[in-house]
Amino acid sequence: MNPLVIEKVFKQYGDKTAVNGLSFEVAQGEIYGLLGANGAGKTTTMRMVLGLILPDGGSIRYRGKTYSTEQLSMLGYLPEERGMYPKIKVSEQILYLAQLRGMSRRDADANLKRWLDRFQVPEYYNKKVEELSKGNQQKIQFIAAVIHKPSILIMDEAFSGLDPVNVELLKSTVKELRDDGASIVFSTHRMEHVEELCRNITIMHKSNPVLQGPIRDIKNRFPKEKVVVGAERDIPGLDRIPGVVSATRTERGYDLRISRKEAAQEILKHAMAQGPVERFELLEPTLNEIFIKTVGESHE
Ligand SMILES: Nc1ncnc2c1ncn2[C@@H]1O[C@H](COP(=O)(O)OP(=O)(O)OP(=O)(O)O)[C@@H](O)[C@H]1O
């Protein structure tokens, strides 16, 4: 049985349905992507998984059990909003939070020092949170979420506010936690991070799960509609090939949009008939394009 199983979960606020029959499972050592436009129901879902609010229907199971305080030490949460106390020292609040999650102060202290070294900021141990930049506060919040080695980790916009170097640092840390066996629910609007980190995803829209499954399978369900041709010279007539919706001249050649896949071969033939082609590629849709299509279509 998977460590986290969400089954037909339903949540209502007054007469507003926030989550409508959502089911998914997160395996051990998996990062699961929970995606959706603003107001889709992601935060509500994460809060239910964390036991902060109760579902009105359906069930959430943690290693086969329903929520109880026993699960506290198993769960870690990185919220989107910074939730640290500005006036209190980093070490004081992290050690306090770790003890709430069942750790001894000594173990928590050793872990905290290890994490601060890992993030190359050992000097933050005695600093007040307000003395740190926004990005560095995010690192501390990250440490607070993982200090007790949770086996189920909920991460909401984990990399927001970080510079590219720190994004890479935290990304590699998330991958390590996955490789160590954590089950991670990862929610973000940054589709390139989802493509890199997640195997399976759910896209929610207006409280409903509208697209679910392995990213690989989802991509195969959507047609390839983009062709890139690399050529320095002009290739007249590309836009007149049947099935070509548009052909745009770029620095390095042409970007084309097609409405049926046979058009790709015609484009290649046409281009080669006029001289050498340096590059030719039929691109699969990006997750960003799939997201926009899905949410747009289900919106209508
Ligand atoms: N405490 C609440 N009381 C009433 N309605 C709520 C409450 N929390 C959320 N909602 C409503 O439930 C729906 C889902 O909200 P939720 O915060 O889960 O969305 P989200 O996917 O996390 O959005 P975002 O990407 O903007 O954070 C929204 O329509 C929201 O207005």
Image: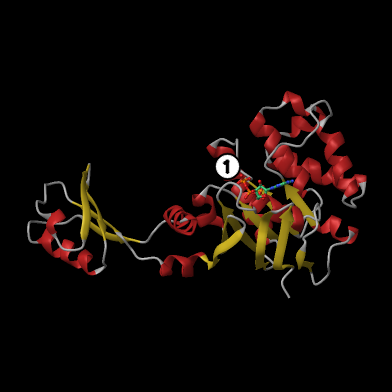
**Residue 175 at x, y = what percent?**
62, 55
Q: Residue at x 17, y 50 (%)?
A: 231
Residue at the limit of the structure toward the left, as seen here: 274
Lateral position of residue 210 relative to residue 258, left or right = right
Picture quarter containing residue 227?
bottom left
**Picture quarter with the N terminus:** bottom right
Q: Circle 1 — which element?
A: helix
- How does the figure colour the protein chain or chains? secondary structure
Image x and y of residue 83, in percent: 76, 37
Residue type at mark 1? Val
Q: Residue furthest front?
A: 15
Left or right, 55 with respect to 170, comes to right
Label 1 crowd bin: few (<14), some (14–19), many (20+), radius 10 Å? some
- Residue, disc 1: 167
Residue 19 vertical placement versus 155 (above, below): below
> Is residue 74 something one can see in this rendering?
yes
- Name the residue: 76% across, 65% down: 57
Q: Is residue 102 left or right of residue 188?
A: right
Q: How many marks?
A: 1
- Is the residue 134 above or below the residue 16 in the image? above
Image position of 126 (left or right of 283): right
Image quarter where the C terminus lies is bottom left
Q: Position of residue 130 (x, y in %)?
A: 75, 25
Q: Nearer the viewer, residue 297 or 277?
A: 297
Q: Is residue 120 visible?
A: no
- Where in the figure is residue 173, as x and y percent of width and height? 65, 50
Q: Residue at x 70, y 52 (%)?
A: 44
